[in-house]
Amino acid sequence: MNDERWFEQRAAAENDDVEVATPAPARLKSRIYSAVVTAMSSKGRLLGLSSTKADGRALCIFEDLLVALPIGESAGHRNPCRVCHARVLGERMAHAPIFWPGCPYSDFHNG
């Protein structure tokens, strides 16, 4: 099902006061997530990956690698998902083959 058809169904259900139980497509969730994180990062630095990990939140395998590398804390405040292949797959495929834990795009497609 493409994203436009999904929106059309939601609009029709809203007009008819019918409850629609189908969840949003994973591609749409991925695009929204990317847009939100991009908007957040354009307004200032993101919470660092080390701080995120210390707060008990899961990091994906690539974010864990960035935390472990001696590249400086400034890299940890950027959005590593922006250059990750999981984001590209998540936004463009209906059922992306992304399986690593801690990746939001994997959660959208496998959750």
Image (tube, rainbow, N blue to C red):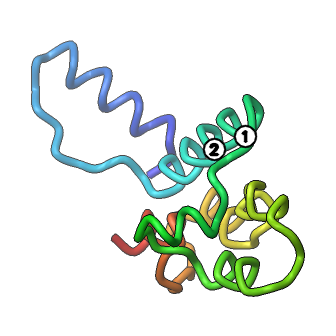
Q: Secondary structure at mark 1?
A: helix
In the picture, measured across the screen, residue 86 lies left or right of residue 71, that is left
Q: Quadrant of residue 51?
A: bottom right
Q: Nearer the viewer, residue 40 or 16?
A: 40
| Residue at the extreme top of the image, as rendered | 15
Q: Nearer the viewer, mark 1 or mark 2?
A: 1
Q: Quadrant of residue 9?
A: top left
Q: Nearer the viewer, residue 36 or 54?
A: 54
Residue drawn 80% across and 65% down? Answer: 73
Q: Quadrant of the C terminus?
A: bottom left
Where residue 106 appears, as percent x and y from the top left, is 50, 73
- Disc 1 crowd rating (10 Å Cα; few below 14, some 14-19, many 20+) is some
Q: Is residue 97 above or below residue 40?
A: below
Identified by mark 2, the residue type is: Val
Identified by mark 1, the residue type is: Ser
Residue drawn 74% across and 55% down? Answer: 77
Where residue 18 appears, as percent x and y from the top left, is 10, 26
Residue drawn 67% across and 47% down? Answer: 46
Q: Secondary structure at mark 2?
A: helix
Q: How many marks?
A: 2
In the picture, measured across the screen, residue 24 lies left or right of residue 105, that is left
Q: Is residue 9 above or below residue 24?
A: above
Q: Is residue 97 above or below residue 88?
A: below
Where residue 96 appears, as percent x and y from the top left, is 56, 74
Residue drawn 17% across and 38% down? Answer: 20
In the picture, measured across the screen, residue 69 lies left or right of residue 111, that is right
Q: Nearer the viewer, residue 101 or 16?
A: 101
Q: Which numbered disc covers residue 41? A: 1
Report which residue position mark 2 lands on: 37
Q: Are marks 1 and 2 in contact (CB under 8 Å)?
A: yes
Q: Is residue 67 above or below residue 39?
A: below
How far apart, in angstroms, are the residues tagged by discs 1 and 2?
6 Å
